[in-house]
Image: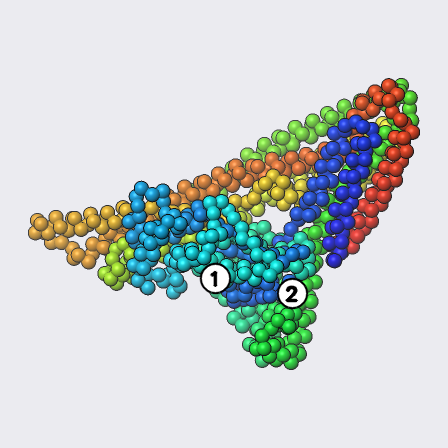
Amino acid sequence: MSLYETLKHQLVQLSDDTATLLEDAEKITETSDEGLSRWKITCRTIARQMHEETMRVAVVGAIKSGKSTLVNTLFGGDFLKRGAGVVTSIVTRVRCSEKLRATLFLKNWAAVNEDIGQASLLLPAQHRADEGSAGFDLRREPDRRILERALSELAADQLITNDTRSAGSVLLSSYLTGFDRVQQYIGDDDSNAVFENDRFSQHRDFVGDDTMAVYLKDVLLEIDRPGPGEGVEIADCQGSDSPNPLHMAMIQDYLSMAHLTVYAISSRTGVRQADIRFLSMIRNMGIMESVVFVVNCDLSEHESLDSLHESLKRIQADLALICPGPEIFSFSSLFLLMDQIEDQLTPRDRDRLSHWRRETAMVDFCSAEWARFQAFLDHKIRRERSALLLKNHLERLEIVSSGISNWIGFQHALLTRDSGGAKALADRLHDQRGRLDRLKLTVKNTLDGAVHQVKNDMKRAVDQFFDAHGDGAVARLIHFVHGYPVEMQRYADSLQSAGFARTLYLVFQEFKQVVDRHMAESVNPEVIRFLQSQERYLVDYLDDIAGPYGSMIDDALARYAGALDDVKMTRREDAPALRIGSEMEAIRKMAALSRPTAAATMHYSAQIKTEAVMRLGFYKLVNLVRQAFKRPAEKARQEPFLAMDAAVKRMKRETERSILFHLKDHKENIKFQYLLKLADAAAAALQRQMLERFQHHGADLSQLVQRIGETQLDKEKITASLELMEATAGSVKTRIADLKAKLQQLSA
């Protein structure tokens, strides 16, 4: 167990022990105390957050760059399907666990049919569906036949877009082909398929086959190996050069949550055009500082270590153009994996491994780089990030611990007095509480005003960002749609051989693919960066307010303790600063908030088919009329071009309308369902922190004073119990101090 995991478990145990101590306190006096109840909630919250805390590492890169092999190497076994499909838009998440289990999260029928609806816009023969139906449904055999017929009517060259298979046609074909095998798993609601232990490998039937993987939306593998450690999630994000822009958007969603991004590059291919485009997108997202590079060394490709170093120099020079001073690690994931699972290898792979081992210089180099990468990973994930999170939790626990000690001090002070002395102390305490209550009200009013101001600022910022008439991302997107060139002569042969409807489908598929890719590569990164900037603005705004008021609270509490100098109280000179920035993930989770997905921007549509076909009929009618009046008519072959030109213009206008409508909805979702709710949740978290400081000085002792006056208390018994509690509280304080010292060692 690593030092971080040891300290994490110690902190959770401390939190549980403190909660037990609070339960004992409630039993001693047999009175309700709001402060004790709040402290218990704090302790339970800390323990839960520590258990739920996940450090996310995204592994990305172009297809065949060794991403899955790298993840397998990190977990010490061949668990992920290597060379999985490139069309599907899934991210495979991997964690260590006590049980070997694969959980496949499947789309529901509504999501499947929505995908098909998007991909089949302008598909020939779609208009022959039953007009009285409620829309396309893959479960209905007649609908599947319509889709099969429409696809079969397309010529082979109409299924190709920019030298690759059209993403839309591949999606439709995959859904149709995989239907019989997958339908048993899909329902009206979201569902999961779980494969455990001996059945674990069956998950590969899904992720390794596009016709089944197309039905997936997420995959979680739990591995019964130590791997990178407890609470660390490694995500194998499919190829960055996937032809499906929606796939890119889903990768962006994970990258925006990741704490570290590992970009894999093959030493055999070096930095490719797809890498440059993807890294430029990462830079536009504003997360380049969290990216490190792993060059997967192909030991069969390089004759010597010198040859390998030459390739590495070229890769480093190429990367430096995009990412100044890139952090690069170079090793062979495949060699390291095969070395770990030698007893499971085929005879051919054993021969390869044996041959590589004889290349001692390259093997030694890769081993040293692998060790350096593991040390970096441990430091980056556990030390830089985790030490800060542990420190924040420990500081809150320390405040609760001080509060318990003060509570014990108050009880002792009352029990050593007669009823008159107890009442006098309670009255004095009541006067001091009045001052603290007024300060609490001032802080609350200030915080309420600040939240109102920051929410107005964020609303204006969102409106400005999504302004289609400004110079931002949305305006540039609309300009891109207007300027998209369609060369009519490219489609001359298709118009003659396949006809207008099928050619229109080809034009639209190419157009939508280009717009989707522009959305994924240019618009989504700006939206993600904007969201992150608004989150930082919110944190900075609230933290700037919290600082001065935190000092005011500490000064007021010091005066309070001075006025009650005859009561044994803990006085802290080094109270931690009030802040909520490092708790934003926990705040989002507690408020059940998540950033609106980048994939959501891709679900626009364009309804143009009927008008386009009618326009073709109009031109034919005009031609017939001209012939009837013996007037010169344009050649018949010009009719489809005129109709196509009009259809393309309409296609652009309708796409613009759909995009603006969809992004307006996306804007409102970002504003009202995320940012404004996040502001409320962050302010509530800050207010809770402030109340935690007040609580141990604001106990209501009136019930206890009354019972003393009525001689209903066994003072000796309660005093003995308090002394035991005091000893336990002292032990908790000692353990907290010890844990603080170890945390300093972790972050060193």
Left/right placement of residue 724 relative to residue 8 reads right
Q: Residue at x 73, y 54 (%)?
A: 5
The amino acid at mark 2 is Gly
Q: Residue at x 57, y 41 (%)?
A: 593
The amino acid at mark 1 is Asp
Q: Which residue is mark 2?
A: 76
Judge the density around disc 1: few (<14), some (14-19), many (≥20) Cα neighbours within 10 Å: some
Residue 479 seen in the figure: no
| Quadrant housing the N terminus | bottom right
Image-quadrant location for residue 219: bottom right
Q: Which residue is mark 1?
A: 209
Residue 416 drawn at (x, y percent): 91, 26
Q: Secondary structure at mark 2?
A: loop
Colouring: rainbow
- Which mark is on residue 4? none
Q: Nearer the viewer, mark 2 or mark 1?
A: 1
Q: Residue at x 56, y 62 (%)?
A: 201
Left/right placement of residue 410 relative to residue 634 reads right
Q: Nearer the viewer, residue 598 or 152?
A: 152
Q: Looking at the image, tell me whether mark 2 or mark 1 is earlier in sequence order.
A: 2
Residue 364 seen in the figure: yes
Q: Residue at x 54, y 53 (%)?
A: 193
Are the residues tagged 2 and 1 within 8 Å (C-beta)?
A: no
| Quadrant housing the C terminus | bottom right
